[in-house]
Each structure stands twice: as structure tokens, then as C-alpha cells.
Image (spheres, rainbow, N blue to C red):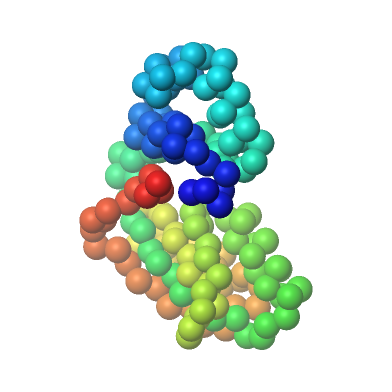
């Protein structure tokens, strides 16, 4: 972690934030042995440096009715910087796509798509995914069950 400019106290703060996001700055500071102001300064520095990128509430896919996860491999017709950026921007604009990764290997991108049903995915693939710029091939893999899903980095 030295390369990220983090010391042992920073790492303890980040571990606490990941495992107990409900804690306020005062409570985090107490757990690492800092008063409110020094803890706040460290958090602020890590935010300014981009180490802490934001705060979110995680929702249950099942209880929100969006419990179908599909991993979609995408191959593009051709590759130029402009065409890749067109595709990447288009994926950012679709709320059903939760994650998009540029990949090495047989496919260019891997998407994680979340919908309510297989029928909704059919509508999404026909109405949106196949209309993404420069798509040549789409290969879909439906998740049967989720074994592990964490947002905590192993710091």
C-alpha cells in the first residue's frame, strides 16, 4: 500500500469503512485512535487523491425484483480508438449494464447485465445490446446463483 501513499492508519480506516459503512467519522476515529479532525483530514485526503471514490447503499437484487444476472461477452466488428469509445460510452448510458470491462482474449468486452426476468433480458438484448455501436457477436451466460459478491478490496 506504500505506493498508494497509505500508511497503516489509513489502511485501518479504509478497512473499517468497507466493513462498517454505517459508522460516522467520530466512530471511525475512535476505532483507529484518532480524534474527529485528524480522521476527517485523512478521509478528505483519500477522497481528494481518488482512493475513496464515493459512498453507496447496496440494494438486494432479489428484493428489488432485479435478480437475473447475465454476463455478456461482446466482440466488436472492428477496432479503432473512436469506435471503442463509442461502444464504451453507449454502455455507460444503459442502466441495465452494471459493469463493463475491456478484455483480452476472444471477446473485447465483458458486461454484467441485471434485469428482472429472462423475458426482460430478451427485450434488452434485442432493443439495446444488439444496437450498441459496432457489435459483431454477443455471447450470454446466465448466473444460476451468486456464491460471492463483495465490494471490499483486500487491503
Residue 15 visible: yes
| Relative vertical location of residue 57 with respect to residue 27 in this rendering, above or below | below
Residue 84 is left or right of residue 43, and the answer is right
> Residue 87 occupies which quadrant of the picture?
bottom right
Q: Residue 141 placed where, x, y %?
A: 35, 71
Residue at 62% from the left image edge and 32% from the top image edge: 45
Residue at 44% from the left image edge and 59% from the top image edge: 113
| Relative vertical location of residue 46 with respect to residue 137 in this rendering, above or below | above
Instruction: From the viewer's side, name the closer residue of 73 and 133.
Output: 73
| Relative vertical location of residue 35 with respect to residue 104 in this rendering, above or below | above
Q: Residue 153 placed where, x, y %?
A: 40, 48
Instruction: From the viewer's side, name the closer residue of 1 and 71.
Output: 1
Q: Residue 14 placed where, x, y %?
A: 44, 36
Residue at 40% from the left image edge and 67% from the top image edge: 71
Residue at 40% from the left image edge and 73% from the top image edge: 140
Residue 119 visible: no
Q: Residue 92 placed where, x, y %?
A: 61, 56
Residue at far right of view:
82
Q: How many labels does the image show?
A: 0
Amino acid at each position: 500500500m506504500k505506493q498508494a501513499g497509505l500508511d497503516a492508519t489509513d489502511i485501518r480506516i479504509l478497512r473499517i469503512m468497507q466493513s462498517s459503512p454505517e459508522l460516522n467519522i467520530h466512530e471511525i476515529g475512535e476505532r483507529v485512535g484518532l480524534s474527529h479532525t485528524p480522521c476527517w483530514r485523512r478521509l478528505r485526503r483519500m477522497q481528494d487523491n481518488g482512493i475513496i471514490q464515493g459512498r453507496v447503499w447496496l440494494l438486494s437484487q432479489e428484493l428489488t425484483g432485479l435478480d437475473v444476472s447475465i454476463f455478456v461477452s461482446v466482440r466488436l466488428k472492428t477496432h479503432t480508438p473512436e469506435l471503442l469509445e463509442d461502444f464504451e460510452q453507449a454502455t455507460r448510458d444503459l442502466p441495465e449494464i452494471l459493469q463493463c470491462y475491456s478484455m483480452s482474449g476472444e471477446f473485447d468486452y465483458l458486461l454484467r447485465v441485471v434485469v428482472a426476468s429472462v423475458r426482460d433480458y430478451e427485450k434488452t438484448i434485442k432493443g439495446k445490446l444488439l444496437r450498441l455501436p459496432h457489435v459483431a457477436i454477443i455471447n450470454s451466460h446466465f448466473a444460476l446463483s451468486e456464491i460471492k459478491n463483495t465490494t471490499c478490496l483486500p487491503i
